[in-house]
Image (spheres, rainbow, N blue to C red):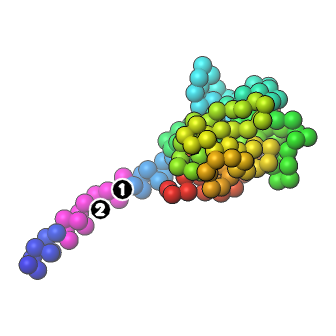
Amino acid sequence: MTDRRIVIKAALGCGIGAMLPELTLAQNDPRNARPQVGDRLVFADGDQKGALITLEALRVGGQPVTAIPKDAASGVVRDGSRLNQILLVRLDPARLQGDTAERAAQGVVAYSAVCTHTGCDSFSWTPEKQSYKCPCHDSEFDPADGAKVIGGPAPRRLPALPVKVIDGQLVVAGVFTGRVGATAN
Ligand code: FES
């Protein structure tokens, strides 16, 4: 019996040991890293996928775009994790509340594109309310006020990402204000 336990322990140890280098590699992969200060923002999808997002590309009150951070020095696009997706929208700066104005750049605000309810990552835009809506269970978020929850079951805001504009391009100016992803994750 004792021998059997030892064999099982050894097998488990070998299995976990074999996995460790892969886990470490994944953790160190810059594609998986959350947005870093100085990263440029590029389009995550569509015809312009991979192109740098400029202030001019975002119309005030227009449709949001989904962005991905890109390391300015190495050119690595951080598309290794869906938790790196960012919702960008340009609003009238006069509408921005409190901290939201401080994190914004010329009316552009940025938030995690993963719902805090159960983690859906496909939002729609309601132009008349200027709000994001998650189609999975209809949670709504107000981007002018820190993406606070204004409807539905989401338990907390979408984490915000400070941004700035350099040479006309959208650039990451800070880290997410909270943990990204669903509450249960
Ligand atoms: S996952 Fe977004 S409302 Fe449920």
Q: How far apart are labels 1 and 2 at the CA level?
A: 10 Å
Magenta-span inclusion, residue 181: no
Q: Amino acid at mark 2?
A: Ile
Which residues make up the magenta segment? Answer: 9-22
Tell me, for residue 60, which label it has, or none.
none
The image position of residue 98, as x and y in percent, is 86, 53
The residue beneath circle 2 is: 16
Does the image show residue 60? yes
Residue visible at 16% across and 69% down in the picture: 8
Q: Split into 4 quadrants, where in the image is the N terminus?
A: bottom left
From the viewer's perspective, is 78 left or right of 159? left
Q: Residue furthest bottom?
A: 2
Residue visible at 76% across and 30% down in the picture: 127
Q: Residue furthest top?
A: 47
The image position of residue 51, as x and y in percent, is 64, 26
Tell me, for residue 21, which label it has, or none.
1
